[in-house]
Image (cartoon, helix red, strand yellow):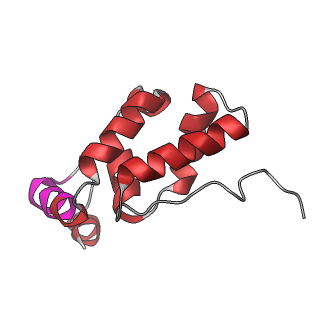
Amino acid sequence: MASFGFESVPFFNGEGDAENFIQYYELEAVKKDWNNGKKCKVIEFCLTGVAKQAFNMLTHEDKNDFSKISKHLIEKCSNATDICIKEFQERIMKTGESPAQFAIELE
């Protein structure tokens, strides 16, 4: 089986210490000699749950700037429960989205 070098890369679900995750992730990126672009691409695959939701809130441009990604994750994942409540309260129906799709997204 092919190895892509991600075995030691940490995963983060938004619970726990976001700063610690970022530090560990950056350490792994240095060991693997990743540039800013590679760090931005790989981190998306390391996030689940609330952390992934926080990442998806970023603009396309911000997703290409690791300092903005890390700052946003630290800010938004400091209290996972709060971000879920805020997203639920602020969620509006998207253009072309059916009421059923909207309800599923709220769930």
Q: Is residue 52 left or right of residue 27?
A: left
Residue 31 lies, with reference to residue 52, above or below; the image says above
Q: Could you tell me if residue 57 is visible in this image? A: no
Residue 5 lies, with reference to residue 71, above or below; the image says below
Magenta span has 2? no
Q: Is residue 72 left or right of residue 67?
A: left
Q: Quadrant of the C terminus?
A: bottom left
Where on the picture, by quarter, is residue 98? Answer: bottom left
Where on the picture, by quarter, is residue 82? Answer: bottom left
Q: Decide which of 32, 60 is in the foreground and name it.
A: 32
Report x, y in % for residue 45: 57, 53
Q: Decide which of 97, 76 is in the foreground and name it.
A: 76
At a point 25% along the width and 44% down the height, the residue shown is 75
Magenta span = 83-93
Q: Decide which of 25, 14 is in the foreground and name it.
A: 25
Magenta span has 88? yes
At a point 21% along the width and 63% down the height, the residue shown is 84
Residue 31 lies, with reference to residue 78, above or below; the image says above
Q: Could you tell me if residue 27 is visible in this image? A: yes
Q: Residue furthest right?
A: 1
Report x, y in % for residue 48: 45, 62
